[in-house]
Image (spheres, coloured by chain):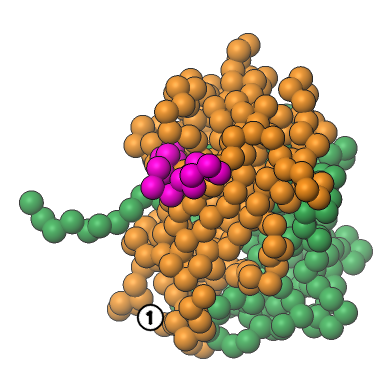
Amino acid sequence: MTDLSNRKPETGAFFSRDRLWHPPGLTPGYKTSVLRSPQKALLSLDGTVSEITGPVFGHSILGELDNDLIHNFAKPGESAIGERIIVHGRVLDERARPVARALLEFWQANAGGRYRHKKESYLAPLDPNFGGCGRTITDADGHYAFRTVKPGPYPWPNGVNDWRPAHIHFSVFGHGFAQRLITQMYFEGDPMIWKCPIVQTIPDRAAIEQLVAALDWGNTIPMDARAYKFDIVLRGRRSTLFENRMEGN
Amino acid sequence: MVQPLGYLKESASQTAGPYVHIGLTPNFCGITGVYESDLGATMVNDRTLGRRITITGRVLDGTGTPLKDALIEIWQADAAGLYNSPSELRGSADPNFSGWGRAATDGETGEYRFETIKPGRVPFRDGRLMAPHISLWIVARGINLGLNTRLYFGDEAAANAEDPVLARIEHRVRVPTLIAAADGDGYRFDIHLQGEKETVFFDI
Ligand SMILES: [Fe+2]
């Protein structure tokens, strides 16, 4: 790890969010959004110190198996069932700069498409050795990696016959509270991506394609695990050129 | 042709879904033994400076039904008005206060709860002081992009009256949607996703 303490902290306000790129709140094809989407205009607010700061997490919070979903819930000597994969990539900002010390938390269904959750009712079985959560923190170049099994697709109550494509949920912390993001990673070549009402909440095909991880043959480990590469982009910050410094700076 | 700016696009948001707890509060949903405790479950310790408060409330949908599968994160200054963040350049925040909390709404009642301290005042971009406030971020099944709002305190009428952010709310009838009512040692803050009492959400 590079020592980050001598790097100047970033204090610019964030680029305004492109809300035509993100899914809108109201997306009737995803029925639950209908009663849960605000209907009034948002109040626009250029970042104050409350938005441009945020919690930053240290590697000390991490346990040894936090980035290994194959083993972090398994009994000693056992492992989760499924296709072994490595997911890796970088967290960058909109200025293409690496985001170091970003906390990534991920969760997913097991290889059969079943979540370990009491509200889950899909008939596929639980895997006694698979919990479904993991986390890691990016290094100085914004890199992260974790090991898991490829999640299965699963049916969900929306339309009569709606299925989610295989996906991994990601929660990402950058360095500012306004950068907070939750998204999902999909897998290259999955024809179900294009049938999914949750995917279809995203209006722009290019924005969807940005969430599809590529099979990374180069980093596949022979006789062990295939690799998928998934880069994540967080909001960028303005340079503080010509901006008045805030009181007390 | 012009020179390319070379900017990237922010990754598009996707809903946190119904099983957000597995990833963000696994102990809360019964997945124990992976992490010692859920991140953000504790914001204070016995040495934290400031007045202890609790914040409770619900997240309500367009029919007034509380969401039983929402997750809320809060971010706030310490008692002296400093954020525990590397981007805070005005001073060092209380090391015994994280400033950040995370809580799921209860699966039966829909109630959330934070134990924290009353934040100090922090400056707006032009240096004027803002009233004490807490930033909130709300995600759930059916919410496609996390919602941002702020909580202000009902017993800070004078500070709220001069707050530059509250002042920008055109429809004054909506200002109370951001003000938590004092209730004993705590404050009550319901978040209305839709309807007459729809909370003011921010594009920050
Ligand atoms: Fe899912």
Residue B147 visible at all:
no
Outermost residue to the right: B184
Q: Is the residue marked by circle 1 packed among few (<14), some (14-19), or many (20+) residues within 10 Å?
A: few
> Residue lying farthest left?
B1
> Dividing the picture into quarters, in which one does residue A109 lie?
top right
Q: Is residue A63 above or below residue B203?
A: below
**Residue at 78% in and 48% down:** A77
Looking at the image, residue A242 sits to the left or right of residue A55; the answer is left
Front in this rendered view, residue B153 or A80 = A80
Q: Which residue is mark 1?
A: A244
Q: Can you name the residue that lies furthest to the front here?
A: A223
In front of the other: A154 or B153: A154
Q: Assess whether residue A93 is covered by the magenta stretch.
A: no
On screen, residue B130 versus residue A89, left or right, reads right
Residue at 60% from the left image edge and 49% from the top image edge: A147
**Is residue B45 at least partly visible in the picture?**
yes
Q: Residue at 59% across / 40% down in the picture?
A: A84
Question: What x and y, as percent, mark residue A16?
Answer: 40, 56
Q: Locate residue B148, reporting x and y percent.
A: 59, 53
Q: Which chain is orange?
A: A
Q: Amino acid at mark 1?
A: Asn
